[in-house]
Amino acid sequence: MKKFFALLKVSVKSMLLTSTSAQGSSRKKAATGLGAMALIAFLGLYLSGFYSFMLMEVLAPVHMEVLVFIFMGMGALIGGLLFTTFAVKGVVFGGKDNDLLLSMPVSSTMLMASRVSAIYLENLLFSIFVLGPAGAVCAFLTQSGVGHSLMFWVRLLIAVFALPLLDTALSVLFGALVAFLSARVSRGALGQNIVMAVYMVAVFWFAFNVNGMLEELAANAAGIKDSLSWAAPMLWMAEGIMGDWGLLLAFAACCVVPFALVVFGLGKVYRQAVTAFAARSARNDYKLSAQSASGQKKALLMKEAKRFFGTPMYFWNSGIGLMMLVAMGVAAIVMQKDIQMFLGLMEGIPLMPLAALMMGLCLSMCAIAAPSISLEGRYLWILRAAPVGEKDLLWIKTGFELLLSVPSTVVAGVCISLAIQLPLWESVLLVAVMLLFSVCHAAFGMLVGLAFPKLDSVNETVVLKQSLAVCLGMFVPMGVLGVCSLLYWLGGMVAGWAALAFPIALLAVCTAVCVSVLATRGPAMLRAL
Amino acid sequence: MLRIEHYSKTYPGGKKAVDDLTIHVRPGEIYGFIGHNGAGKTTTLRACAGVMDFTEGTIAIDGHDVKKDPVGAKRVTAFLPDNPDLYEFMKGIDYLNFIADLYDIPAEQRTADIKKYADAFELTGNLGSPIGSYSHGMRQKLALISAFIRRPRLLILDEPFVGLDPSASHIMKGYLADLCRSGSAVFFSTHVLEVAEKLCHQIAIIKDGRLVKCGPTEELVGDSSLEDVFLDLEGEK
């Protein structure tokens, strides 16, 4: 067991506590990992708490609390699958340290188990943050008193620990399939992007239809529960949490058995699997033709684009905000009549600031510049040795985010302005302020990327999903939006013009500071890495 | 071509990796840099290439100060680290074009040079494949091709023979000699003393960050062998 825990420690450390820089102190490294976890936890708790509350408010009065746990269980399962399937490809089958560890005197089953356990721990966090708030909401809103007993929490705890086992088993199987296809298909990134696109369409569809579904739920909760027999394990988990120990044990067995089968089954062929998934032999049929030349800046921008569009993990983690931004604009045009009818019922809503807040939240999720230095990692020597100034390198990386975010912002801004029929000056102001925010976001992302780099991470998953730079690059701009909202409210108490002037002034100052610090200190920070 | 004057490098924590190093590499010279592991060879090469910052001394390449005019110095230099990691999301040909674009190499020249060097290293057929599918030796060859197509005034190589098959090593030595005949210079580190003895016009031996001996290969070796001289200076004989 000593060996197993040593291997597990290595896997978890490589996922969470990869060093920030060569000079980084251990305290700084630990703060980076813990800070990232705290921010992810905050987001998980917030989203789960919000949806659990919405569902429980509808279902508790008809004594169908069990449905909340079914849906939250499904949410945790699907969310965990989404987050860890691609991580499995990198952490379990594609770790850069596989050669080293496979040469060690430990069984491949133990190595596989340690890698899978690291994935389990990530899924466990997800399970805690999704099922935990559901339990808390149940304790407050239940009308049958089921959430008030100690045994309820014991049963919930068992479910919280068991569910990630099933999640991990499934994500390891899917991850193995993804790794296998990536090694065999020449356009693996395109395939992964298509799978993710289908998933995101489903998520958007759910988000747009959630209100109708809630109404249907309240009207026919019992019927819906009966129709969920195909998701028997989730049903058993929910009934188990609500008090049925037999079903809870059946659910636990449903989780433990697949996990054990995956660990011991794939563990026996782990060495063969890693070899097969890594075996991408180079073709030998290329015919050299006349090459064309382009400039330095175009070459560097093209490199950023190839990495962004050719790395599904990067594309979906960092591009989702922009997709949501454009989708929001298009949806506003498509649903123009519904929106105007809704707005007609709610007089006095400050439309432009509200639109700016929504657009800002989407833009905040577009962390393209923040991880770009860390993604260079072991390739950084190429740029350092190239005849390109550090300042140019930083502006090109920042500019690449702007190249994507500026057109998206303009499209979304114009669409939303048309849909909610803003006056021309407000439309122009909305687009201008959002462009200012885009510049601020990109420059700030670049700065946190330089301040908290992960240059020696074992794969891009670690950089994109567990780095402090990405978390700060997303959540600090959201915080700035929160402060802007506060200033809007405070300004409104002073004078009408101040309501808009105060938050715009804050954004302008933040942008000026970020751009100025990036221009003056950025090159030295890059040199010091 | 390369002037290293009183260069020192101290790492955070106080460890002095290189102490007061002065080396001059003239045009047309192949200059070997040898020393035991951790002697300060890689630190020096990385500082020359502008990849690593330093505080003491000056380094100039073809008249360009590495600190004051880093872009000018890098424009005439090609650097290859000991284990070159290349962008795995790119195809081999994309990487060569990327490097050629960074060095503003005209289209016709790059096409001709890529053909010349890729054919010589037997890599042309593989250039359409992603670098992620390359073996260690193929990556090493691609990195070398990317260095040669720049037609550098100074070529800095860190352990260039590691990972190359005997045939590729032989071809590389020929191109290094060609480069020097055209007036460029090569500054490289190696542990293969026989190669250094046969290939280099000048050799410098570094120990614990300090230069212990340097000069023309014939003078340095005399009637002995480079291995004997090296072991003698290292106090291991």
Image (cartoon, helix red, strand yellow):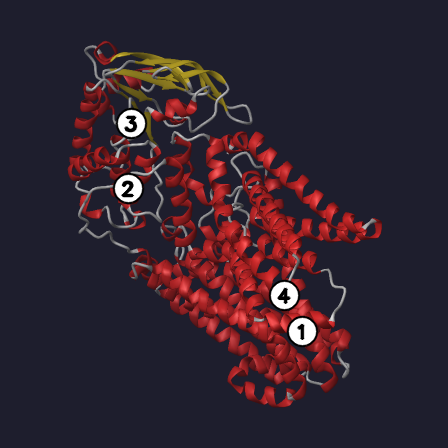
Question: Which residue in the structure is indicated by mark 1?
Answer: A341
Question: Which residue in the structure is indicated by mark 4?
Answer: A128
Q: Are marks 4 and 3 on the same chain?
A: no
Chain assignment, label 4: A
Question: Which residue in the structure is indicated by mark 3?
Answer: B191
Crowding near the residue tagged with mark 3, few <14, some 14–19, many ≥20 C-alpha atoms within 10 Å: some
In the image, what residue type sits under mark 1? Met
Q: Residue at x 19, y 39 (%)?
A: B118
- Of the image marks 1 and 4, the number of the one nearer the N terminus: 4
Q: Are marks 2 and 1 on the same chain?
A: no
| Residue A452 appears left or right of A509 | left
Secondary structure, mark 1, is helix
Chain assignment, label 3: B
Q: Are marks 3 and 1 on the same chain?
A: no
* Cα gap from disc 3 to disc 1, whole angstroms: 78 Å
Crowding near the residue tagged with mark 1, few <14, some 14–19, many ≥20 C-alpha atoms within 10 Å: few
* Cα gap from disc 2 to disc 1, whole angstroms: 62 Å
* Cα gap from disc 4 to disc 3, whole angstroms: 54 Å
User: Where residue A425 sits in the image (x, y, percent)?
Assistant: 66, 52
In the image, what residue type sits under mark 2? Arg
Label drawn at residue B139: 2
| Number of the front mark, 4 or 3 | 4
Q: Nearer the viewer, residue B165 or B38?
A: B165
Q: Residue at x 55, y 59 (%)?
A: A325
Chain assignment, label 1: A
User: Where residue B107 sits in the image (x, y, percent)?
Assistant: 25, 36
| Number of the front mark, 3 or 1 | 1
Secondary structure, mark 4, is helix
In the image, what residue type sits under mark 4? Ile
Crowding near the residue tagged with mark 4, few <14, some 14–19, many ≥20 C-alpha atoms within 10 Å: many
